[in-house]
Image (tube, helix red, strand yellow):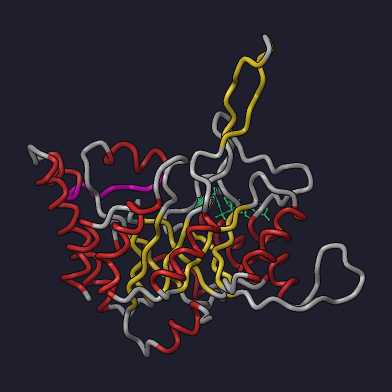
Amino acid sequence: MTKITQYLKESEGKTLFSIEIIPPMKGQHLGELMSHIEPLMEFNPPFIEVTYHREEYIEKSVDGLIKRIPIRKRPGTLGICAAIMQKFQVEAVPHVICGGFTTEETEDFLIDLHYLGIENALILRGDQEKGEDRFVPKPGGHAYANELVQQVANMNKGILLHEETESFPTNFCIGVAAYPEKHFEAVSMEEDLRYLKQKVDAGADYIVTQMFFDNKKYFDFVKACREIGINVPIIPGIKPLATAKQLEILPSIFHLEIPEDLSNAVRACDNNAAIKQVGIEWAVEQGKELIKAGVPALHFYTMSKSDSVRAIASQLF
Ligand SMILES: Cc1cc2nc3c(=O)[nH]c(=O)nc-3n(C[C@H](O)[C@H](O)[C@H](O)COP(=O)(O)OP(=O)(O)OC[C@H]3O[C@@H](n4cnc5c(N)ncnc54)[C@H](O)[C@@H]3O)c2cc1C
């Protein structure tokens, strides 16, 4: 198995292509997801990231009593990673989240990854539970991603949570998330960057950014990171816009800005095909500038759909 950082090192300055996919809704067939990944394989992604989705609670009447029942709408991250590695012979990078897990449950999950030969993981806190206004860790779970990074780094040294003697060390390459437009909970960019540095100091090997639509935000962010001593690779995240609704949804969910030129171009379209084309052209221009600047990889948020990303990648790679 190859570490993401090794791929980045061996690329000798050439920008790599990578994608993030999301597991299908529970009850759906994996075949459709695979058929969206397949057309992107010609661009040689060395790794594919697979998101992790925490449980949601629904209320259901059981024997006359209202019960809160946990439902995971998109399970299967681990299985999908194994299937991707087997089918496409590329690294699958599972996202590992703090939310909804005790540290012991997380340790067991990481051991499963290790047994499957999965040596790359993107370590995240996760968002708050649906309906909650702030993130609350499960009792006995991690409150912030840096704590989970530390747990993985300890396992890489053979240190488990409760075992008295040192165990067989894992060999995880650790990725973490970052936000060129600041994480919405942080009071300032400076504070957010301090916490990002904490994750890197705890053992993170590389960073993947939240999507952004204005490259200047990424360039300023990378400069600010370097100034405070964050020296690991910072992979930019790109999402092609595909619908007019996303002009409202993306800023409200991901706390980012959409440049006026882009929103005006989308609003001038009179059908979805035209909007998709605007999204593709914008992402191609972003990609060209980022590649020219020598970014380590372009990481595409595909939402498990391949058509726009394929059109973009065929112009860039
Ligand atoms: C590339 C990428 C992939 C993602 N994939 C998923 C996914 O698969 N599943 C999912 O549920 N979510 C995913 N998310 C969303 C992510 O989980 C949320 O944005 C979450 O709110 C923050 O996660 P984090 O790991 O950045 O948290 P953290 O690094 O823990 O930061 C969270 C907030 O707390 C602050 N903070 C950090 N450390 C401390 C500390 N020690 N003390 C006090 N404050 C602190 C930070 O400044 C920030 O405001 C992804 C995000 C990105 C960018």
Seen in the image, is 110 located left or right of residue 205? right
Q: Please determine whether, in this image, residue 255 is positioned above or below residue 82.
A: above
Residue found 36% across the figure and 69% down from its top: 18
Measured as percent of width and height from the top left, residue 177 is found at 51, 60
Which one is nearer the viewer's eye here, 229 or 299?
299
Residue 279 at x, y percent in the picture: 19, 53
Q: Nearer the viewer, residue 286 or 42?
A: 42
- Residue range corresponding to the magenta coloring: 254-262
Please tell me in which quadrant of the rendered image residue 275 appears: top left
Left/right of residue 107 with respect to residue 42 in the rendered view: right
- 278 up-or-down from 250: above or below: below
Residue 7, image x and y in percent?
44, 83
**Image check: 284 left or right of 70?**
left
**Residue drawn at (65%, 51%) of the image:** 98
In the rendered image, the vertical position of residue 91 relative to residue 20, given as above or below: below
The answer to whether residue 41 is magenta is: no
Depth order, front residue of 180/297: 297
Residue furthest right as drawn:
164
Task: Give percent across and percent down for residue 167.
Answer: 82, 76
- What is the quadrant of residue 308 in the picture? bottom left
User: Which residue is situated farthest in the top direction here?
Assistant: 64
| Residue at the (78%, 76%) spot, across then down | 158
Q: Quadrant of the C terminus?
A: bottom left
Q: Residue at x 58, y 39 (%)?
A: 55
Q: Is residue 259 magenta?
A: yes
- Horizontally, residue 176 falls left or right of residue 143, namely left
